[in-house]
């Protein structure tokens, strides 16, 4: 067994964006899994015509700018928000396509939760993974 020297940088594997219904639902839900992030969705959704800076989001929620930055980064990584750099400021808007995707996925997940699995719950080989028929 080989070990990495203590000074070597740690490299984290980056997973490609999930394609399956279950994985994508969980990815989107995990990003929403903190009250401040759900509130950010509301704040950004209420300002679709005017993107908000990190400072404006932080002020609206009465949280620190570093905290807002951390949560917005998580929402951006999952696809919930668009990020636009304007000089030293970064502005965010709600990604309405992701909102629609999430609604559709949740509807499918619950619709298919009540039907038998045609692939014996083997999602890795299921031809219906994207829609979980």
Image (spheres, rainbow, N blue to C red):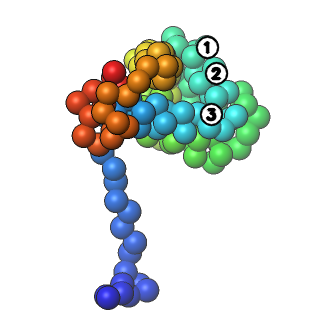
Q: Residue at x 37, y 37 (%)?
A: 121
**1 vs 78: above or below:** below
The span from disc 2 to disc 3 (Cα, nearest Å) is 10 Å
Which residue, as the protein is rendered here, is positioned at the far top?
A: 49
- Residue 46's tag is 1
For the residues labelled 3 and 1, say whether their Cβ atoms are less than 8 Å apart. no
Q: Which residue is mark 3?
A: 37
The span from disc 3 to disc 1 (Cα, nearest Å) is 14 Å
For the question of whether residue 78 can be seen, the reply is: no
Residue situated in front as seen by the camera: 33 or 8:
33
Q: Residue at x 32, y 88 (%)?
A: 1
x and y percent of residue 10 in the render?
A: 40, 72
**3 vs 79: above or below:** below
The span from disc 2 to disc 1 (Cα, nearest Å) is 5 Å
Please state if 74 lies on the left or on the right of 130 as rendered.
Answer: right
For the residues labelled 2 and 1, say whether their Cβ atoms are less than 8 Å apart. yes
Residue situated in front as seen by the camera: 43 or 124:
124
Per the image, label 3 sits on a secondary structure element best described as helix
Please state if 44 lies on the left or on the right of 1 as rendered.
Answer: right
**115 vs 129: above or below:** above
Q: Which residue is mark 2?
A: 43
Report the mark closest to the observer, 2 or 3: 3
Per the image, label 2 sits on a secondary structure element best described as helix
Q: Residue at x 54, y 33 (%)?
A: 29
Q: Residue at x 47, y 15 (%)?
A: 111
Report the mark closest to the observer, 3 or 1: 3
For the residues labelled 2 and 3, say whether their Cβ atoms are less than 8 Å apart. no
Return the disc, 2 or 3, that comes first in the chain's sequence: 3
Return the disc, 3 or 1, that comes first in the chain's sequence: 3
Please state if 19 lies on the left or on the right of 37 as rendered.
Answer: left
């Amino acid at each position: 067994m080989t070990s990495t020297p203590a000074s070597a940088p740690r490299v984290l594997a980056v997973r490609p964006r999930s394609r399956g219904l279950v994985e994508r639902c969980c990815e989107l839900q995990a990003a929403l899994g903190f009250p401040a992030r759900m509130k950010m969705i509301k704040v950004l959704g209420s300002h679709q015509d005017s993107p908000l800076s990190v400072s404006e989001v932080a002020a609206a929620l009465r949280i620190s700018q570093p905290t807002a930055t951390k949560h917005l980064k998580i929402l951006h990584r999952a696809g919930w928000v668009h990020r636009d750099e304007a000089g030293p400021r970064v502005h965010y808007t709600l990604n309405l396509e992701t909102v629609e995707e999430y609604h559709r996925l949740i509807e499918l997940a619950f619709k298919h939760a009540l039907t038998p699995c045609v692939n014996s719950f083997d999602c890795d080989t299921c031809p219906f993974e994207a829609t979980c028929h």
